[in-house]
Amino acid sequence: MRLSRRQILLGAIAGTLVPRPALAKKPIQTLRPAPVAVQWPGHNREMPGLLGFNGSIPGPELRFRQGDQLDVRLENGLQDGALVHWHGVRAPNRMDGVSILTQEVVPPGAHYDYSFALPDAGTFWYHSHYLSYEQVGRGLFGPLIVEERDPPNVDHDITAMLADFRTTSDGMFDTDFGVMDDFSRKGRMGDLLRVFLSQKTVRQGDRVRLRLVNAAIDRVFRLDLDGIDGSVVALDGMPLESPTQLQHLIMAPAQRVDIIGFATSEITFNLTEGNTRNPIASIALSGKNPAPDRSPVTALPMHGLSEPGQITQTLELLMRGGEGDRNHGGFGTWAFNGVSGLPNKPFGQFRQGETARIVLLNPTGFAHGIHLHGHHFREISENGTFGPLRDTLLVASGETREIVCAFDNPGRWLFHCHMLSHSADGMATWIDVS
Ligand code: C2O
Ligand code: CU
């Protein structure tokens, strides 16, 4: 077992002053990003250019109980810098894994210890936050599941991570991450669609919890699920006040959906584009549940987030750029409020506990998935009511959407498009909560 410097210091003090108690602490887990040799569909050979945490894509599923301490050592096995971001988690700012704002990039061969308590139960994920469009696009992502203290009764709890990879004409992984058209349009779309399932079979009649995570760098997944009679119980890790009937799903990059339902037949993930439905993965049946639990799906235990208070500021976030945007000087380069890349001054400054409204204006020709670090926000609908808590909101071309957020987590937080090609090409800003 490795000990952090803090533990060694504490141990030394304890050793000299008082008899050492048995350490109840869980050992530190390690995440090691490095080049990876994985089985690629249709190929038995190694696929150069892919990266994985601990030798796999996705990385290992990290599972905790609400309130647990996350203790993870990042050991950089790359030839490049590394950082890990815990997407959607209300972590302390210095643990957020963002270069410039919260920590130094971890150089090759070096390590960094992340350590914090997990305040909320839910479906989260971790991913590289250094050159993320490239490192996530090569495979550096994995699920982070925080179980409820009193989890709902299900027969299976299955994680489904969605991603896409681009291949070349000879079926290899496409390692060219510099294609101008990707940056200035809808991003790098992969032709190889994957649904990474933590489990491949269920019995007919089983009660199943499905945790969907869109880990693609740029692709919006439009999905219809067959074979499950279910309800959506959480979005972006946050429970819904009342579960809603499972329908067609539209998932922007980084968004999550939790579903609880019954397996009526093989569960199939269908990619839906216009009138075409394309099955991309399925969970097979392995028999029949002799005594299915048919009790209705109820809401998950509520989160402990502050509700919005009185709105004291309204800010506008104007998206610009992309192909065809003549009102934007740097053709093809993305910007928020006329600035491409992180500005020196924050986009917003909030007192801790302050509630503000942000108007998201998208006159560009493309959709954007706007993500705020360290917080969840609610959309304000046209009739003034508040929508469910989210950490990423898909804003379609031509749309204006409004969100409200209680800024209760102090620090400097990134606010960016989670279409990672757009973010890499300038669509990022930050806020300051103090
Ligand atoms: Cu998924 Cu800046 O994050
Ligand atoms: Cu975007």
Image (spheres, rainbow, N blue to C red):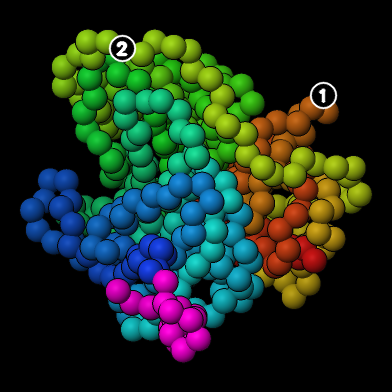
Q: Mark 2 highlights which residue?
A: 292
Which span of residues is magenta-colored? 1-21
The quadrant of the image that shows the N terminus is bottom left
Relative horizontal placement of residue 107, taking residue 60 as reference (left or right):
right
- Mark 2: is the Cβ under 8 angstroms from ligand 1? no
Residue 160 appears at what percent x and percent y? 35, 38
For the point 21% across and 28% down, the residue is 201
Residue lying farthest to the front in this orientation: 19
For the point 56% across and 68% down, the residue is 95
Q: For the residue marked with disc 1, what is the amino acid?
A: Asn
Instruction: Give residue 383's mark.
Output: 1
Relative horizontal placement of residue 252, taking residue 127 as reference (left or right):
right
The quadrant of the image that shows the C terminus is bottom right
> Quick check: can you spot residue 87?
no
Q: Nearer the viewer, residue 355 or 417?
A: 355
For the point 45% across and 74% down, the residue is 113
Q: Is residue 337 above or below residue 214?
A: below
Residue 252 appears at what percent x and percent y? 52, 41
